[in-house]
Amino acid sequence: MSAKHDKNNMINNLVSINYPSVEATKQLIESKMDVKIGSPLEMTREQAVEFLENLMPELQDSYFAVELRKKWSL
């Protein structure tokens, strides 16, 4: 293969990459910034149960996990 052929392939590959639109990028950034800061201890009982069910095994004995179980008698 010639160097020119390699260069053309590289350009074609770059052109064919499907980048997200500017609007999609803005929406993603806004959704990441729109996070409610709070404590797991402010959760409802249902939220606490779901949180504990999805919590990594390594964190099952963490402060918040223990306190949620105490708070909701789980």
Image (cartoon, rainbow, N blue to C red):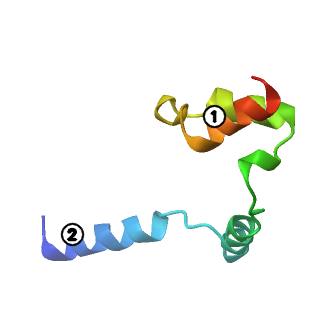
Which residue matches tag 1?
Answer: 66
Residue at position x 73%, y 31% from top? 70
Q: Is residue 49 above or below residue 13?
A: above
Structural distance between the alpha carbons of marks 1 and 2: 59 Å
The residue furthest front is 70
Q: Is residue 8 above or below residue 63?
A: below
Q: Give the side of residue 65 with respect to residue 62, left or right.
A: right
Q: Residues within 10 Å of mark 2 (few under 14, many from 20)?
A: few
Relative image position of residue 54 (x, y in whole percent) = 63, 31
Q: Earlier in the sequence, mark 1 or mark 2?
A: 2
Q: Is residue 13 above or below residue 53?
A: below
Tell me if I can see residue 54 in this picture: yes
Q: Residues within 10 Å of mark 1 (few under 14, many from 20)?
A: some
Q: Amino acid at mark 1?
A: Val
Q: Give the side of residue 49 with respect to residue 44, left or right.
A: left
Residue at position x 59%, y 34% from top? 55
- Between marks 1 and 2 in the image, the one whose residue lies nearer the viewer: 1
Which residue matches tag 2?
Answer: 6
Residue at position x 87%, y 39% from top? 44
Quarter of the image with the N terminus in it: bottom left
Relative image position of residue 46 (x, y in whole percent) = 85, 31
Residue at position x 81%, y 30% from top? 72
Relative image position of residue 22 (x, y in whole percent) = 67, 77
- Taking depth in this image into account, of 20 and 9 the one nearest to the observer is 20
